């Protein structure tokens, strides 16, 4: 079986990547762009910046403290290798296969005889190995190497990359196992890498080393830093924590590993801890886009209800990591709230990052852009992780390769099987050719223009000898959905809807999801968007770009009429809005509320957030202030 | 004349420090605590941390790259020297005088023969002089040395400190003058130091060097950094900029210097540029407290309208720097909007920083604290600049000494003279013994319990031979003020109110400012506080601490009734509020607005923001969400 995550047991079983094929549509198109543009783009940038040559220099004995790139640049090579492994298996593209061999050879040459593999420490005049566990990222890099090896192992089998990874993992177990260094890495990732590598190889000791790292954490083994130990989750043991905090990607990679370890060990306490953290974090520390991370300062979660739209960080990588966590929790529990959040995050964080050509990316994904971003030079490295303009590459360039590996394996997240049959979670045109646990084949084709249309047509492609159950996720937002089969239409409540029978080839089950645009109202405790409303349509959150206003400057003082329901238009929705005349005084805190003269009502055009800034720099807002004034005529 | 700022001309002339004596009250008490506690506290911490010994080690040839403290720690010694100089002159305290001599001797020993004076660069294995203009702070340190020398020169006359400063200034002019290094310092401060040192010594060339630094800036001489060149105002020339941006203290020190240079050179273009920047920055980038700096990430201004209360940085030093700018603009123009902002900033930023005992300080001054701060250990250095708990000392400890020098010279900001007479800008019990330009003495005593009371009694202490004009500032917030003299009471509109006559000893002029607590409504474009109101009383902004609620947890879901005007109570005000029951669901963006069950209305007690967290850790909010529901009975 080939899939990024293969727990030994759980309420849902992932389908193998070979069993699901995206056949175009929203995600199929993005997967194709990823294959044809992004993968080569990433390799070219890493070659240009010397991040690949860092491996050569270690092998040649010519490296030193002056090596280019941050201490985590090795991990970008490994994430690209992971993406290439999924892509090679998906498409059989010989270019991807060649790239894997090319990169693997360079990586392998840099490995020390004892298995240590890192281009930033321990060679020449570089600082000694593991001399900066807080910020050195050595084990983090190794974790990504293991994830790449998992992809290779599951799609191809043992090869040089897997052998390199095995030696590296063995080195880590020797260096940090019982009797070794009693330390942890400032950036979790080794844990999730070790756990899956252990599963992929059937090597229990790797999972055990992951558990050891998990349980060591939270006791202040890392030194305090100005941002505090919460930054790297070394403030509270993971079994005791109630909420995610600190650096978002760190927190989420750690949580993903915790689910893996909990499942493999039957450790319900640990699983419940992560579920509890998910619940509070999703209820109080998550943006409507699914984005996580409210602060630029530490790329981190803020406090409960601290969700500013303008300074939202919502790092693309945190979106990837959130999907990793929710997917593992879903496999463990079968709970659809996790696949609901995955859908939200895929459409509104991960899809937002890459440009249409797959050669530029958002790093941060704010929900409000006050000043249009400066267009990034496609030939330059962006030193900044600001939102507003997609950049070809970043000084800290974790997001492009994370998008690449996620898109290359995206079909892994569409469906699962269980003892009863097949469950489809995400809707995209695809072909599924799987087997039930008893060995019977299930073959279905999904046809849909989702999310442009809410009609999802599941066609049975082969006769079944005996009854099985087809289960479809009805998203939490989809009140009013219906299911049609055999000429009968019935309501399909949010959650899961099932059809069980001995399907015949040609049978069709049609899920109709209501795609009228709708208002969504933030909890009043989210101070930063008080008095505002968001508009969503299906799984997409919509936003307003200033370029779609008659006067772009009106974005600061637009209000919408909450009594006029949003209307669908091709490519988005319109709401009724008007611009207040807020010339304003010298001091912005006057003794009386602003008595602004409102302009005329007009149709304000909204479009999916994931596509924003594709037409060039613009200011933008997702949450729209609500007019408290009476509209002159209702429903106009 | 002794005063921190003595322009050669301007619409208003500062009184000398010797001409004004605070006689208790809000500021007099704080000045006394500063004298008796804060100054020694600062010296003790700098001794303990080795920041003072850094000078000894340079002199002894034993320093190196391992010296303790940041590259700007020398400046803390200089700011303390400045504070001690003002204090020594104010009180004649021999302890202050002894401290000046003690510190000066250690500083002087570290000066190189060519005048260069810095403990972080250029000695032993330290990096070479001026090898890191962006972040090295060498010229910044020197600027603070010059400000200390100005204080000494004006209160005492030439001494070793002044001689050290003169050699340092001459070194800077040689190194960075025409023909020297074409560079600027990443942290403005040398400019304001040089300009005032030039004024104090009558040495035009120092002012010219300040002008040169000012005009060099904004052309990208400093290398780009991830935060962008706006961080150190090297993005746009100061004459062209429309608004303050980047690091707030940097922006404001630079603006202060620009006013100095503009005034000395009669450079109206430059003066107008700073006025224009002040206007937009105050209208769109300033908190109701007067605090400046919306972002933790870069301690900087955000975009227009980006004023989050919870993540407000509002560094204490930015408050000090804002007063420096506004005071200079007031002296140049006579415009009361500047002294209005000074009052706001003094009461709501600078007064907020020190603890009652003068031995702990706020660095950041947020307007909303979601989680009570951790009480700081009085014996430990706080590594963090978070709000919530005052700390004895900081890793970056710029604020304590900035508070110290401001409080020690606070009486400089109370009054000015002009050709007509005396103007009083800030109200505090004090004694003024000054001379008009024609040499006639003016003697007045101010009696007031301001800001607890709005009655300000100005008593003439000596007969005047001829008429002169007493002018009093009526703050912008003080609509309804009255002036009483000779038994007649008349309205006093916000702005200035004057009485002109040949005063006789014993004459009384009484200004009555309305001190009823009042609502203030943020501009609707300040997204982060939409639907909220603030409460002010006189010059004080009030806030709500969770410890004053029946259930502290109610702070997150409290709403106030905007139709019930705030009522004064001793020590603050009460508003009518109630707590919504927002148990909430799993996903905080539901399809319908929250239908929260409101609790009973009750009196919510507010107190001055500057005193918050003095009773122990608490959560806190200053902007209060407004109830949109109808109150059950009005005026209850």
Image (cartoon, coloured by chain):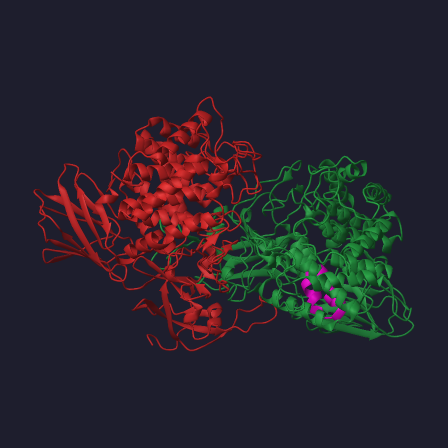
Chain colours: A green, B red
In terms of depth relative to the viewer, which is nearer, B131 or B32? B32
In terms of depth relative to the viewer, which is nearer, A31 or A66? A66
User: In this rendering, does residue B292 appear at all?
Assistant: no
Horizontal relation, residue A20 to residue B450: left or right: right
Can residue B624 be found in the magenta stretch? no
User: In this rendering, does residue B165 appear at all?
Assistant: yes
* Residue B471 in picture, x, y percent from top left: 19, 47
* Residue B497 in picture, x, y percent from top left: 19, 50
Horizontal relation, residue A12 to residue B421: left or right: right
Residue A342: quarter of image: bottom right
Horizontal relation, residue B430 to residue B235: left or right: left
Q: Quadrant of the N terminus of chain A?
A: bottom right
- Point out the stretch of residues depicted in magenta: A324-343
Q: Is residue B304 above or below residue B108?
A: below
Can residue A331 be found in the magenta stretch? yes
Extreme residue in the top direction? B179
* Residue B488 in picture, x, y percent from top left: 11, 57
The secondary structure that most of the magenta stretch takes on is helix
Q: How many marks?
A: 0
Extreme residue in the front direction? B60
Point 56% across, 72% down: residue: B584
* Residue B364 in picture, x, y percent from top left: 46, 54
């Amino acid at each position: 079986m080939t899939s990024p995550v293969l727990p030994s047991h759980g309420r849902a079983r992932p389908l193998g990547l070979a069993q699901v094929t995206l056949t175009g549509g929203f995600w199929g198109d993005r997967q194709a762009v990823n294959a044809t543009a992004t993968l080569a783009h990433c390799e070219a940038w890493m070659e240009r910046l010397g991040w690949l040559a860092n491996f050569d220099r270690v092998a040649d004995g010519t490296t030193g403290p002056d090596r280019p790139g941050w201490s985590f640049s090795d991990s970008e090579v490994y994430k690209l290798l992971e993406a290439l492994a999924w892509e090679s298996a998906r498409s059989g593209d010989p270019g991807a296969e060649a790239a894997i061999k090319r990169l693997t050879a360079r990586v392998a040459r840099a490995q020390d005889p004892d298995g240590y593999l890192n281009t930033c420490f321990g060679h020449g005049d570089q600082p000694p190995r593991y001399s900066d566990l807080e910020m050195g990222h050595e084990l983090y890099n190794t974790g990504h190497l293991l994830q790449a090896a998992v992809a290779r192992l599951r799609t191809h089998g043992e090869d040089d990359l897997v052998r390199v990874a095995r030696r590296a993992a063995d080195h880590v177990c020797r260096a940090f196992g019982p009797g070794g260094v009693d330390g942890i890495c400032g950036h979790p990732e080794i844990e999730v890498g070790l756990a899956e590598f252990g599963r992929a190889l059937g090597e229990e000791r790797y999972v055990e080393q992951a558990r050891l790292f998990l349980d060591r954490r939270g006791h202040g083994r890392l030194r305090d830093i100005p941002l505090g130990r919460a930054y790297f989750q070394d403030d509270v043991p993971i079994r005791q924590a109630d909420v995610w905090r600190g650096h978002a990607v760190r927190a989420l990679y750690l949580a993903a590993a915790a689910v893996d370890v909990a499942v493999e060990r039957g450790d319900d306490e640990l699983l419940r801890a992560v579920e509890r953290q998910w619940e509070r974090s999703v209820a109080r520390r998550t943006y409507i886009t699914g984005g996580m991370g409210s602060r630029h300062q530490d790329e981190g979660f803020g406090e409960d209800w601290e969700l500013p739209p303008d300074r939202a960080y919502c790092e693309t990588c945190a979106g990837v990591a959130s999907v990793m966590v929710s997917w593992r929790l879903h496999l463990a529990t079968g709970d659809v709230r996790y696949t609901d959040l995955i859908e939200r995050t895929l459409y509104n964080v991960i899809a937002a990052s890459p440009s249409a050509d797959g050669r530029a990316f958002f790093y941060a994904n704010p929900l409000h852009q006050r000043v249009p971003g400066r267009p990034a030079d496609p030939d330059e490295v962006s030193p900044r992780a600001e939102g507003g303009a997609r950049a070809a590459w970043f000084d800290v360039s974790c997001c492009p390769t994370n998008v690449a590996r996620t898109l290359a394996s995206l079909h892994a997240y569409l469906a699962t099987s269980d003892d009863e049959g097949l469950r489809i979670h995400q809707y995209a045109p695809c072909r599924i050719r799987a087997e039930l646990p008893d060995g019977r084949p299930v073959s279905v084709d999904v046809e849909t223009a989702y999310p442009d249309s809410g009609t999802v047509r599941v066609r049975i492609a082969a006769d079944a000898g005996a009854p099985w159950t087809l289960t479809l996720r009805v998203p939490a937002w989809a009140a009013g959905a219906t299911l049609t089969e055999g000429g009968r239409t019935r309501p399909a409540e949010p959650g899961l809807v099932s059809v069980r029978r001995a399907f015949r080839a040609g049978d069709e089950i049609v899920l109709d999801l209501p795609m009228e645009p709708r208002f969504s109202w933030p909890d009043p405790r989210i101070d930063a968007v008080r008095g505002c409303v968001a508009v969503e349509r299906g799984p997409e959150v919509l936003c307003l770009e200033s370029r779609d206003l008659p006067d772009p400057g009106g974005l600061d003082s637009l209000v919408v009429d909450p009594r006029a329901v949003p209307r669908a238009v091709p490519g988005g929705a319109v709401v009724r809005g008007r611009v207040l005349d807020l010339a304003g005084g010298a001091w912005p805190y006057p003794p009386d509320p602003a008595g602004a003269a409102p302009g005329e009502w007009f149709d304000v055009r909204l479009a999916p957030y994931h596509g924003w800034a594709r037409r060039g720099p613009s200011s933008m807002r997702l949450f729209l202030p609500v007019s408290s004034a009476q509209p002159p005529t209702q429903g106009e």
